[in-house]
Every structure is written in structure tokens, then in C-alpha cells.
């Protein structure tokens, strides 16, 4: 398994936070407590923990991890980002022991993270299918022509091939 872990999001906590904020808040931050989108202030300076925002609608404080499996974790965000990446990019899955060694965290923390990452992956709208609890990777490719479709409708006359890579347990009776 070759993984490009050179990206700062895997090494630097603030780069990881920016990465997560860009994913979660593509149109700017919103308050997870009341849904406010415009009256949000970023609290900066040493007296505030990093990534803290304040909603001027309900006066609550929040960060990008509120409401996610990373909420209230003491594990650095770049290690979370790395764990998500490792667990999503490995077809064979990554064990808590591997995370423990690769991320330099305790086995207990690694076990907790692995559990939470799997939970997050099964929660997503495109929930993985399969019966082992491991994620499947899906990919769409257009090849050739689909004889059932009319010509001249752009890409629609091509055959769509969806490949699925993942783990299934085959039960024999
Ligand atoms: Zn609010």
C-alpha cells in the first residue's frame, strides 16, 4: 500500500483544521446549535483554543468538529485526517494496531479512532454496502455504446460501468 502522506494536512494541526473546515463548510461556517450562517465570529488569539468560532445568534461557541465523531477528542486533528485517509484508501482495511504504529498514538487511542472512523463511514448518506462493515470503493467509468440509448445524447449513449471494490464474506451453506 503506497500512501502519499506528504500533504501538510497529515502533519500539521492547523492545515488539517482548514482541510476539515473546507469539507464541512464549503459555503462558510454555520452554527451547529442554531443554524446561523451569517453572524459568525472567529475567535482568535491565545486566550482561545484554535479553531473556535462564536455564533452571534445564540452566543454558543463551536469548532468544525462539533457534531462529528471527532468531537471532544484530544487526538490531534491531523492524526484524525490521516486515520480517515488510511482507513478509506486501504482495500484490506487498517487495524487499530497499524494506526497505533503509523500515527504514533497509544493503542487505546488508535482503537477508539478506528471505531469512530468506521462509525462515521457508515453514517454517511452514501453508506457503504457489503456485509463485513468495511467500506467499499465505487468508481464510475463510461465505455462503449449502450445500444438501448439513442445516439447523439452526449455521454448518455455510453455504457456506464460501476466497479465496486471491497470485502464480502461469502457464506456457503
Ligand atoms: Zn447559533
Image (cartoon, rainbow, N blue to C red):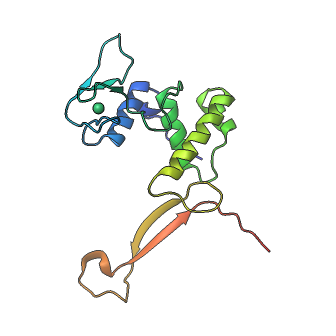
Q: Nearer the viewer, residue 156 or 31?
A: 31
* Residue 164 horizontal side relative to residue 32, left or right: right
In the image, residue 69 above or below residue 1: above
* Residue 173 horizontal side relative to residue 152, left or right: right
Q: Nearer the viewer, residue 108 or 67?
A: 67
Residue 9 location, quadrant: top left
Find ligand 1 in the image and state its quadrant: top left
At 37% from the left and 29% from the top, the residue drawn is 63
Can residue 16 be seen?
A: yes
Residue 27 location, quadrant: top left
Total marks shown come to 0
| Relative image position of residue 173 (x, y in whole percent) | 80, 74
At 45% from the left and 73% from the top, the residue drawn is 161
| Relative image position of residue 165 (x, y in whole percent) | 56, 62
At 54% from the left and 26% from the top, the residue drawn is 75
| Relative image position of residue 16 (x, y in whole percent) | 41, 31
Amino acid at each position: 500500500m503506497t500512501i502519499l502522506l506528504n500533504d501538510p494536512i497529515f502533519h500539521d494541526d492547523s492545515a488539517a483544521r482548514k482541510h476539515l473546515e473546507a469539507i464541512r463548510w464549503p459555503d462558510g461556517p454555520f452554527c451547529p446549535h442554531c443554524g446561523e450562517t451569517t453572524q459568525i465570529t472567529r475567535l482568535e488569539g491565545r486566550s482561545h483554543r484554535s479553531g473556535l468560532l462564536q455564533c452571534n445568534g445564540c452566543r454558543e461557541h463551536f469548532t468544525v468538529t462539533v457534531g462529528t465523531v471527532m468531537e471532544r477528542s484530544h487526538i490531534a486533528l491531523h492524526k484524525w485526517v490521516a486515520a480517515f485517509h488510511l482507513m478509506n484508501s486501504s482495500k484490506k482495511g487498517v487495524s487499530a494496531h497499524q494506526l497505533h504504529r503509523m500515527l504514533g498514538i497509544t493503542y487505546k487511542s488508535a482503537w477508539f479512532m478506528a471505531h469512530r472512523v468506521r462509525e462515521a463511514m457508515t453514517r454517511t448518506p452514501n453508506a457503504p454496502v457489503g456485509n463485513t462493515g468495511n467500506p467499499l470503493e465505487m468508481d464510475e467509468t463510461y465505455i462503449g455504446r449502450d445500444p438501448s440509448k439513442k445516439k447523439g445524447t452526449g455521454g448518455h449513449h455510453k455504457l456506464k460501468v460501476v466497479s465496486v471494490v471491497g470485502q464480502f464474506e461469502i457464506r456457503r451453506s
